[in-house]
Amino acid sequence: MYLLEKLMQITAFQKHCNGKDYHTIAKASLIKDTQPLADKRAYWKIEVRDQVFNFYPNKKYYLEDGLWQLSSYTEIPYEEYACDVSNNIPEDIETEFDKETCSEIRKKLFLYLKGKIVSYNVKISNEYFKEKYLDLINELNKEGANINFQIVKQLA
């Protein structure tokens, strides 16, 4: 039996005017395909409206690349990506954007996240948690992002 194992999940949401309710704008799941002949690299699956976009992050920057791409899709007008190929074969993010661009964006990730009406909820499977993720989220929140963080036993 083949399984898609979720390692991390990020939900982008917006609070309603009442301050209590919210609606989901987009979500991303870091997935590892455990099928015997599958590519064992983890990839991000971003779901926004009726579209799905997949990409391979740099394995040193799983969280940074996921937050960057998810935040980008929350700002792009639907008309710009509605005709793109949905549920594409994952592409390497550093091939699509080049290594220098990716490096610059990772260094300035807070600029993509601060002062937005979008908040993020990050869940990480206990076995894939690294202290650097918590440090990154704390730093981004100090810079004005709004990210909740949760370590869970297992992602559904």
Image (spheres, rainbow, N blue to C red):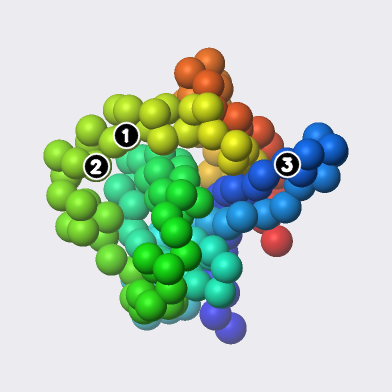
Q: Residue at x 54, y 65 (%)?
A: 47
Residue closest to the far bottom = 1
Classify mark 1: helix, strand or loop. helix
Q: Are marks 1 and 2 in contact (CB under 8 Å)?
A: yes
Residue 102 numbered mark, or none: 2
Q: Amino acid at mark 1?
A: Arg
Q: Amino acid at mark 2?
A: Cys
Residue 127: x %, y % from top left: 58, 44
Q: Amino acid at mark 3?
A: Lys
Marks 3/2: CA distance? 30 Å
> Which residue is denoted by mark 3 in the rendering?
15
Does the image show residue 63? yes
In the image, taking residue 38 as reference, residue 11 lies left or right, namely right
Q: Earlier in the sequence, mark 3 or mark 2?
A: 3
Classify mark 2: helix, strand or loop. helix
> Which residue is denoted by mark 1 in the rendering?
106
Classify mark 3: helix, strand or loop. strand
Classify residue 62 by image quadrant.
Answer: top left
